[in-house]
Image (cartoon, rainbow, N blue to C red):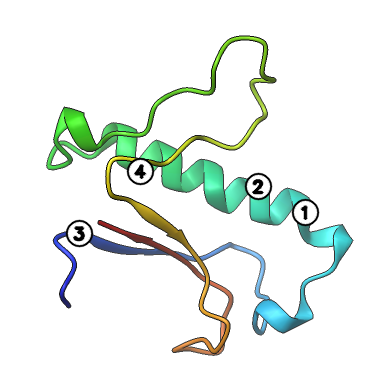
Amino acid sequence: PKARHDYLILPMQEVKGISLLNHTHLPLVQNLHNAANILLRTLPEIPEKLRPRRPTSGVSEDALPVFDSGWRVGYHSVPSMDLLHLHVIS
């Protein structure tokens, strides 16, 4: 891959693709993004300058993390595999 770091995060619950998501899956999607946050905060090979920052004060602890410093976190509209997965790429 062209990215320096490229991670996939899959949920424990099997979902056969992003097109099958609905409002009931919001906690699942939030958990995937929180897992990306934990991954980037804890892996020793991620330099400090590339780690996600915490949301600004006054924002709920449940808020999704802010990914900047060159990270792309998201889903393919036409996925490369059948199961739902979140890409974390630098």
Q: Badge 4: few (under 14), some or many (20 or more) residues near its Cα, within 10 Å? A: some
Q: Which residue is mark 1?
A: 26
Mark 1 element type: helix
Q: Looking at the figure, which quarter contains the C terminus? A: bottom left
Question: Rounded to the nearest whole Å, what is the CA distance between mark 2 and mark 3?
Answer: 22 Å
Which label is found at residue 5?
3
Circle 2 packing at 10 Å, graded few (<14), some (14-19), many (20+), is: some
Residue 25 vertical position relative to residue 59 in the rendered view, above or below: below
Relative image position of residue 8 (x, y in whole percent): 38, 66
Residue type (three-letter) at the residue carrying disc 4: Leu
User: Which three-letter amino acid code belongs to the residue tagged 2?
Assistant: Gln
Q: x%, y% of residue 65? A: 52, 35
| Residue at mark 2 | 30
- Binning the other alpha carbons within 10 Å of mark 3 as few (below 14), some (14 to 19) or many (20 upward) gives few
Task: Confirm or deny contact between disc 2 and disc 1 (CB under 8 A).
Answer: yes
On screen, residue 70 versus residue 10, left or right, reads left
Which amino acid does the dot numbered 1 rest on?
Leu
Nearer the N terminus, badge 3 or badge 4? 3
Quarter of the image that includes the N terminus: bottom left
> Residue 44: image x %, image y %?
15, 36
Cα–Cα gap, marks 4 and 1: 20 Å
Expressed as whole percent of the image width and height from the top left, the position of residue 71 reads: 33, 51
Asked if the residue under mark 1 is in contact with the one under mark 3, i.e. CB atoms within 8 Å, the reply is no
Q: Is residue 86 above or below residue 27?
A: below
Q: Earlier in the sequence, mark 3 or mark 1?
A: 3
| Residue in the image at 28% along x and 40% along y | 69
As measured in the structure, the alpha-carbon distance from the residue carrying label 2 to the one carrying label 1 is: 6 Å
Q: Earlier in the sequence, mark 2 or mark 3?
A: 3
Residue depicted at x 58% and y 82%: 77
Q: Which residue is mark 4?
A: 39
For marks 2 and 4 on the same chain, the one whose residue lies earlier in the sequence = 2
